[in-house]
Image (cartoon, rainbow, N blue to C red):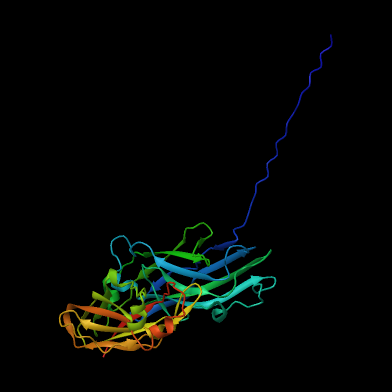
Amino acid sequence: MNRIVLFLIFFIVTTPLFKAQAVQIAPYNTGWLPVDTYDGTRVNNLIQIPIHLSSSQGFQMNQWTLSFRVIGPITNGTQTISAADIGKLKFQINSVTSQGSPNANDNNQIANAGTLGLITAKIPFSTALTNFVANSSYDLTIRNRYFQINLGYAVEIEGGAYLEQYKSWDNYRVNLALEIRNRKNEILPTGQPSLISFDMRIMPPGIPPGSEQFSLLLAPAATNVQLEFQTPSDYANGVSKTQIKAASIISNTPYFVQVHTLSSELSSPSNTLSFNTVKLSMADNLTGLYSPGVNLSPTNQVLYSNSAHTISKWYDLKYEITPPTGPIGFFNKPYETYSGTVIFTITPQ
């Protein structure tokens, strides 16, 4: 009996599947920050933030927010930048470029600081989440093609005698987390922020300036404030929020505390409110005597003034929205969370 033997050879061919992320940021640094003068230092385009968009339809990118925060201490291993001095590091938009065919979004809008709605003022570094742009209406819904926007940010550090305490040949490492969120407030593409770092060496030569010494430090609990309208009485009479021991100040010279906002409006995912409906006043925590207060706006305004005191003093802050300018205009606004950023500065008189 003849036998038939069959040899069967199976070839299994696998092909890797590569899929570009529909929405992704890929930040990187172009160098480092050498602080070699007591006048401060600025490096243009030190941080680059490419926004990659590949067939991003369906990802709710017709409105989006780009933010950052400092993560961990800014340290060289032996010395650490104090919480009061972290805000002396600042971002500022330096350049906006794009590439694609066509070199615009699907609404034929060219990308620039104005169309993107970028904050163009200097933005202090913070451990709290801080916006480069909030609820941008520049539509990043890109259909069936690739489009990239690249944001170049300058980084600078304020000058002053305070740099003396941080002098070291060892570099400080500045770690940042950046995130882009869609209209649904989802972090894309994976739900996790993108991490980036840069080095900074502080070694100014010579003798530090011996002029005024002053500092203002916000308490951690005072970095966020919430004013909430819940009842008819709130809309009729207004609401307020007082933060006790919100700021500590020490100064060997008479000083002004000034305040301004990064934008003229408080924004939600779908609406805006004028920032100047919010009034802010300040009081010595021991006396409880409040300043007249200012209505918040992008214009720098004097909130408080005082003579020199070389022992730290605590101050209270009161935020309020009262008739007639505020709540009357809120009846027709959706019940949403509106947010914005307030910047405090201290300067000698």
Tell me what residue is drawn at x 19 percent, y 84 percent. Answer: 252
Residue 203 image offset from top left, x and y in percent? 33, 72
Q: Nearer the viewer, residue 61 or 231?
A: 231
Residue 244, located in which quarter of the rendered image?
Answer: bottom left
Question: Horizontal placement of 99 versus 251: left or right?
Answer: right
Residue 182 image offset from top left, x and y in percent? 53, 66
Image quadrant in which the N terminus is located: top right
Q: Residue furthest top?
A: 1
Q: Is there any visible trace of residue 255 in the rendered image?
A: no
Residue 209, located in which quarter of the rendered image?
Answer: bottom left
Residue 215, located in which quarter of the rendered image?
Answer: bottom left
Q: Nearer the viewer, residue 296 or 262?
A: 296
Q: Is residue 12 above or below residue 119?
A: above
Question: Horizontal placement of 276 versus 103: left or right?
Answer: left
Q: How many marks?
A: 0
Residue 48 image offset from top left, x and y in percent? 51, 69
Residue 205 image offset from top left, x and y in percent? 32, 76
Tell me what residue is drawn at x 73 percent, y 31 percent. Answer: 10
Q: Residue furthest right?
A: 2
Question: Horizontal placement of 12 versus 332: left or right?
Answer: right
Q: Is there any visible trace of residue 120 in the rendered image?
A: yes
Q: Is residue 87 above or below residue 212?
A: above
Image quadrant in which the C terminus is located: bottom left
